């Protein structure tokens, strides 16, 4: 049974990457994520920074997300895939942020994305 979320729905929200242990974030062109959510299912896409395009799909239980993702790097040849989990949080101003724990090629990473 799904736990009830305390943070609002992600449906239709846009986020930008603020920080990541996987790569340096270009503040002029950070990765942008578009989220959609319905009945515990989440999905979306992302572009920017080191990524040409990417897609994710997963589930939400309470304020916890579990996703699988795949994206193509700017070199146009390298495809990256992995899994991850996020915590949906509200910052002091009430803006939604995502704290993401993810794995790429067996290496753990953390990134923070903030609502636009």
Image (cartoon, rainbow, N blue to C red):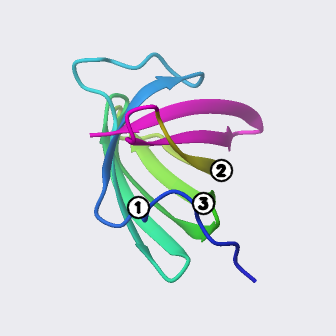
Q: Nearer the viewer, residue 29 or 51?
A: 29
- Residue range of the region highlighted in magenta in the rendering: 92-116
Residue 37 sits in quarter = bottom left
Position of residue 49 in the picture relative to residue 29 (left or right)? right
Across the whole image, how many numbered discs are drawn on residues? 3
| Label 3 – label 2 distance at C-alpha | 5 Å
| Label 2 – label 1 distance at C-alpha | 17 Å
Q: Quadrant of the N terminus?
A: bottom right
Residue, x 31% and y 56% (percent of image)?
13
Disc marking residue 10: 1
Tell which tag, 1 or 3, sits nearer the viewer. Answer: 1
Give the residue pinned by disc 3.
67
Look at the picture and state if 68 lies above or below 88.
below
Considering only order in the chain, which callout, 1 or 2, is on the residue closer to the N terminus? 1
Residue 103 sits in quarter = top right
* Residue 99 spot, x, y in % from top left: 58, 38
Considering only order in the chain, which callout, 3 or 1, is on the residue closer to the N terminus? 1
Give the residue pinned by disc 2.
84
Position of residue 50 in the picture relative to residue 70 (left or right)? left
Residue, x 41% and y 61% (percent of image)?
10
Q: Helix, strand or loop at disc 3? A: strand
Q: Nearer the viewer, residue 65 or 6?
A: 6
Asked if disc 3 and disc 2 are in contact, CB closer than 8 Å, the reply is: yes
Q: Quadrant of the C terminus?
A: top left
* Residue 26 spot, x, y in % from top left: 32, 18
């Amino acid at each position: 049974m799904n736990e009830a979320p305390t943070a609002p729905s992600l449906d239709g929200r846009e986020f930008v990457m603020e920080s990541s242990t996987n790569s340096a974030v270009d503040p002029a062109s950070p990765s942008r994520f578009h989220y959609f959510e319905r009945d515990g299912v989440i999905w979306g896409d992302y572009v920017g920074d080191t990524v040409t395009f990417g897609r994710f799909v997963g589930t939400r239980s309470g304020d916890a997300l579990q996703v699988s993702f795949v994206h193509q790097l700017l070199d146009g040849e390298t495809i990256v895939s992995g899994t991850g989990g996020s915590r949906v949080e509200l910052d002091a101003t009430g803006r939604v942020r995502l704290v993401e724990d993810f794995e790429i090629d067996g290496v753990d990473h953390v990134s923070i994305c903030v609502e636009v």
